Image (cartoon, rainbow, N blue to C red):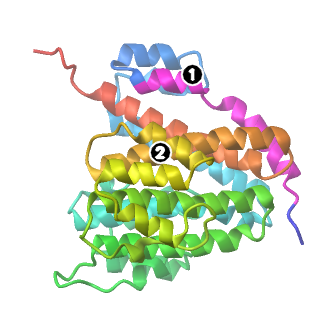
């Protein structure tokens, strides 16, 4: 039986009136002090943050943001009942990114709270689950917990073998989660409509594009074929390998832009090209640019197909972007002033 997206799409379109618009997000991305932050937020849908700005630490506001987005996503899940499983394709990619962050934090010896600092809670990994997982003592323990919970991405961690240090290689973790996430998302999307299947294909392509860029920056440290995942429509395995073999990051940008010409990925690559930091910073900049480009595409698809999954996908994506911008604004304005003596 096919899922009727109409009622959920209408509700998602209504909920989008409570999100910050793009112009406000642009101002938030540049704000440098709490006074200006209060001014931007006080008359908008996030005025709830204003009353405690300046009186509570950054982590207090960060936790409030996490709880709010978790509540919004849980509401979508309840409205989709008894076919909420069709939303797995929407939320599992965010779970994969969260688990990558936790695994990196474990390997890097980070405190549990910092391991989920950039996490986006979902109905498949809610706030309580994230806190519990962040306390994992090893990547193997993380995988074991997910297996016990029956989470679809558990196999991405349990199939990884420990290296000579007794800990799994982080590239192996990335590859395992990439394969598990791609399989689960594409499979879940088969139960949905055309916009959801396009979303799933884009998730796979986004993974491959970002992975190719990172591998080109750390050329020679691992076999790139292990990080390519099947299921996308833009970047094939040969094109992926060609990008990873580029002579440095700028050449990789040129190769990827050529392969993805005419797609949203080419636009995102052009926007992210100016990032000159570490491979991790370049990947973050590209992921942000891809999210922006996908939101623009989904906005058009929502206008053309207002009763499809497109409004739901757009609502979820805009929530993710909003929380990320607000998090950075809170941390940036919570730091001591550069002009302080």
Query: Above or below — where is 30 with respect to 271?
Result: above
- Residue tagged 2: 269
* x, y percent for residue 117: 36, 49
* x, y percent for residue 89: 65, 64
Give the structural element (helix, strand or loop) at label 1: helix
| Direction from residue 273 to residue 66 in the image, left or right | right
In front: label 2 or label 1: 2
Q: Based on the displayed image, in which of its 4 quarters is residue 133 positioned?
A: bottom left
Secondary structure mainly formed by the magenta segment: helix
Instruction: Give the camera-side residue of 100 and 294.
Output: 294
**N-term mark: 2 or 1:** 1
Q: Residue at x 46, y 72 (%)?
A: 228
- Residue tagged 1: 23
Dot 2 crowding, Cα within 10 Å, few <14, some 14–19, many 20+:
many
Judge whether residue 304 can be spotted in this image: yes
Q: Based on the displayed image, in which of its 4 quarters is residue 276 positioned?
A: top left
Quadrant where the N terminus lies?
Answer: bottom right
Q: Based on the displayed image, in which of its 4 quarters is residue 252 positioned?
A: bottom left
Residue range highlighted in magenta: 4-29
Query: Above or below — where is 6 with respect to 335?
Result: below
Query: Above or below — where is 53 with respect to 110?
Result: above
Instruction: Give the camera-side residue of 257 and 264.
Output: 257
> Magenta stretch: residue 202 in it?
no
| Direction from residue 333 to residue 120 in the image, left or right | right
Q: Residue at x 65, y 53 (%)?
A: 74
| Direction from residue 286 to residue 319 in the image, left or right | right
Q: Residue at x 41, y 83 (%)?
A: 158
* x, y percent for residue 29: 43, 27
Dot 1 crowding, Cα within 10 Å, few <14, some 14–19, many 20+:
few
* x, y percent for residue 129: 47, 64
């Amino acid at each position: 039986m096919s899922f009727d997206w109409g009622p959920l799409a209408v509700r998602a379109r209504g909920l989008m009136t409570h999100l910050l618009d793009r112009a406000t997000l642009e101002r938030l991305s540049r704000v440098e002090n709490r006074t200006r932050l209060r001014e931007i937020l006080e008359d908008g849908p996030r005025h709830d943050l204003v009353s405690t700005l300046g009186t509570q630490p950054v982590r207090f506001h960060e936790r409030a943001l996490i709880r709010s987005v978790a509540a919004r996503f849980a509401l979508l899940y309840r409205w989709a009942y008894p076919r909420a499983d069709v939303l797995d394709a929407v939320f599992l990619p965010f779970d994969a990114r969260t688990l990558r962050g936790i695994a990196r934090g474990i390997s890097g010896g980070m405190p549990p709270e910092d391991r989920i600092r950039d996490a986006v809670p979902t109905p498949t990994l809610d706030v309580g689950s994230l806190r519990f997982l962040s306390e994992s003592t090893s990547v193997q323990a993380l995988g074991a917990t997910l297996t016990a919970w029956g989470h679809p991405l558990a196999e991405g961690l349990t199939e990884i073998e420990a290296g000579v240090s007794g800990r799994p290689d982080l590239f192996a973790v990335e590859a395992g989660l990439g394969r598990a996430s791609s399989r689960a998302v594409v499979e879940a999307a088969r139960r949905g409509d055309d916009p959801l299947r396009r979303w799933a294909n884009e998730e796979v392509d986004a993974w491959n594009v970002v992975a190719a860029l990172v591998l080109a920056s750390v050329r020679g440290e691992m076999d790139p074929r292990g990080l390519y995942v099947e299921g996308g429509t833009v970047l094939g395995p040969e094109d992926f390998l060609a990008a990873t073999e580029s002579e440095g990051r700028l050449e990789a940008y040129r190769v990827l832009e050529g392969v993805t010409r005419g797609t949203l990925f080419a636009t995102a690559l052009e926007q992210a090209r100016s990032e000159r930091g570490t491979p991790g910073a370049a990947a973050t900049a590209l992921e942000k640019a891809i999210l922006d480009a996908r939101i623009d595409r989904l906005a058009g698809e929502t206008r053309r197909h207002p009763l499809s999954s497109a409004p739901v996908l757009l609502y979820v994506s805009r929530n993710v972007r909003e929380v990320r911008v607000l998090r950075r604004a809170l941390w940036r304005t919570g730091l001591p002033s550069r002009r302080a003596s």
